[in-house]
Amino acid sequence: MLPWFRAGVNPFRPHIRRHTTCSNRAPMPQPVTLVLGAVPWEIKPVIAALAGRRPGRLGRFPYHAGRIGRQRVVTAITGVGKTNAAFIATLFIARFKPARLIYTGSAARLNPELRTGDIIVGRRTFHHDAGSWQAHGMLYRKVIGPVAGHPTHFRYDADRGLLRAALAAAGTHEPRIVTANGSTYRPAIRAGLICSGDVFGMPAAKIADIRAKLKCDLVEMEGSAIGQVCHELRVPHLVIRAGSNRAQPDPGGDYQALGQIAARQAAFFALHLVRSLR
């Protein structure tokens, strides 16, 4: 057994008391809500909100544990990209056996109606780079999966219960005022479609192809990998993203200016959702 999977490193174990009955067994701990983000500023508000915050490490990968409302929460960063997201999500799911996984952060705006800070609750995520790039654009397709007869898909639906809870929470959440791109406003919240790929900037042809074929609102680099891992491991999941810069070939400067604004909006809504969960 790997050393970080031993019961001794469970951040919640010191708070578990044994029954005084003859069974002498510890009561079942409350399930964990796992909240992940790609980069530190995407989960910074989550860490700050943890009551009884305790840092820890799973191997060499840091996390924080504590409580938000009635929920036991573990939060960590995955790093950028689908491989990092899938790896860290799988590792933390195997260790903490979470009741649910919420992924929060920023994403580039594909939908021209979205503004910086507008929050999309992902009802479905897509791998926008799964298939074949042909003369007429992307041909999306399933591929051979690890289980015979069960190919891996390029799209994954959010958990219905979490999606309903998030949309209900949207009715009681008041996003913080944003000033961006020459305007001041209160961001909107709605359900939408999110796609992921291992590219930071994209040419106009690729952006147009995604809009035409997938009709996604936002594009980022981790959500569909989270969807795939949670689908295969049967963990309810939801991806929450706020729009930052517009999708473009070279988003570096705009992302630096707008990414943290969007990350905070998504994190504050994720916190509101977690507090509303029973």
Image (tube, grey):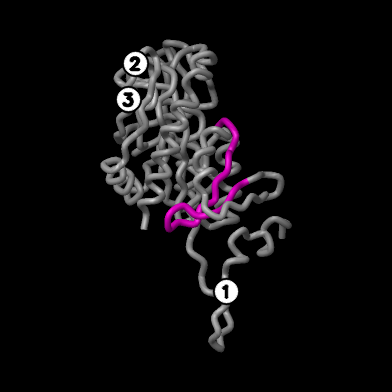
The span from disc 2 to disc 1 (Cα, nearest Å) is: 53 Å
The correct choice, above or below, for 124 with respect to 204 in the image is: below
Q: At which x and y percent is residue 227?
A: 45, 41
- The residue at which mark 2 appears reads as 183
Q: Are marks 3 and 1 in contact (CB under 8 Å)?
A: no
N-terminal-most mark, 2 or 1: 1
Position of the N terminus, as image quadrant, is bottom right
Say which element carries label 1: loop
Say few, some or many: other residues with alpha carbon within 10 Å of mark 2 (under 14 / 14 to 19 / 20 or more).
Answer: few
The residue lying at 58 percent from left, 38 percent from top is 78
Q: Is residue 149 visible?
A: no
> Three-letter amino acid code at disc 2?
Ser
- The residue at which mark 1 appears reads as 17
Position of the C terminus, as image quadrant, is bottom left
The residue lying at 38 percent from left, 17 percent from top is 209
- The residue at which mark 3 appears reads as 215
Q: Are marks 2 and 1 in contact (CB under 8 Å)?
A: no
The span from disc 3 to disc 1 (Cα, nearest Å) is: 51 Å
The residue lying at 42 percent from left, 28 percent from top is 140
Say few, some or many: other residues with alpha carbon within 10 Å of mark 1 (under 14 / 14 to 19 / 20 or more).
Answer: few
Using the image, tell me which numbered label, if any, was put on residue 272: none
The residue lying at 53 percent from left, 13 percent from top is 253
> Three-letter amino acid code at disc 3?
Lys
- Identify the magenta region: 63-81
- Residue 175 lies in quadrant: top left
Residue 231 in magenta stretch = no
N-terminal-most mark, 3 or 1: 1
Q: At which x and y percent is residue 126?
A: 42, 32
Residue sitting nearer the eye, 119 or 187: 187
Say which element carries label 3: loop
Relative to residue 24, is residue 179 drawn left or right?
left
Residue sitting nearer the eye, 28 or 3: 28
